[in-house]
Image (spheres, helix red, strand yellow):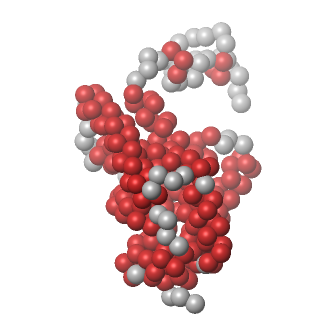
Amino acid sequence: MMQTPLKRVRGHGSAKSGTEHFWMQRLTAIALAPLGIWFVYSLLTLIGMEHAGVAEWMRHPVNGTLLALLAGTVFYHSKLGIQVVIEDYVHAEWLKFTSLILNNFIHVLLGVAAVISVLRVAFGG
Amino acid sequence: MSTSNKPASGGYQTDRPRFDRPLSPHLQVYRWQISMTMSILHRVSGVALSVGSIVLTWWLTAAAVGGDYYAWVAGILGHPVGLVVLFGWSVAFFYHLGNGIRHLLWDAGWGFELKSMHITGWSVVALTVVATALTWWCAWSRIGGAA
């Protein structure tokens, strides 16, 4: 059979999805390294604080921005990772598809809830 | 599925169907190497962090709901059971962070030699222990020693 490198150029490998999954997993990983360290440091400064203090911390534009970015990136990275685990270990076709669909829904739900919560505190109310 | 014993081109002959043969990578006969444990732990810690991220959303939601509910959630997280979960989360976080950086270096084409693989592997283990200990030492001194 005649083969040309065209499908590779277009990113259409055997999985038909190119390198997007691979690339986004790395991109979110690079973002999460500093964001994660900042988050752990921040948690240490928030220990023992009442709600008012934590809310005040979240209202600071830098903290609100980084928290929203962290939440979005965490759930994107997590979605990609769990997807690979499902694809590796779940072989029954119907169960695999159900799991992949649920994986998407749950991660979007958790991510949106997290970002909305940060915005809710940031903009008061 | 075909149960034909016809050998693949150039393959060896066998009396048994293909699917009866042991599958690679024959984990039960491999000599232990740090790379295999590090690899599976990366996945395990990743799944643990995914589950743990539910707590992140829970905490942020509690902050948005406010007052009494936040105090209730903070109380659960500060309870010994909550602290054990948070401790596990921190171990998984530092391990996944360290080994993730190791993966990124591999992606950049660095560190494939056996020697550097061992050095970076054990460095990640050391980093996990030190960073976790340092974090909880800070946390403990802020809590003030009270459980």
Relative placement, left or right, of A87 versus A96 is left
Residue visible at 63% across and 20% down?
B18
| Image quadrant occupied by the C terminus of chain A | bottom right
How far across and how far down the image is residue A43, in percent? 44, 63
How far across and how far down the image is residue B105, in percent? 29, 46
How far across and how far down the image is residue A37, in percent? 37, 59
Residue visible at 40% across and 75% down?
A63
Query: In front here: B66 or A15?
Result: B66
Query: In front here: A78 or B94?
Result: B94
Residue visible at 46% across and 41% down?
B42
Q: Residue furthest bottom?
A: A125
Relative placement, left or right, of A34 versus B61 is left
Query: In front here: B51 or B140?
Result: B140
Relative placement, left or right, of A45 versus B56 is left
Q: Is residue A32 above or below residue A3?
A: below
Q: Is residue B60 visible?
A: yes
Q: Is residue A50 above or below residue A14?
A: below
Residue visible at 44% across and 17% down?
B31
Query: In front here: A12 or B102?
Result: B102
Q: How many marks do you count on the picture?
A: 0
Q: Is residue A2 above or below residue B7?
A: below
Q: Is residue A4 above or below residue B64?
A: above
How far across and how far down the image is residue B104, in percent? 33, 49
Q: Is residue A31 visible?
A: no
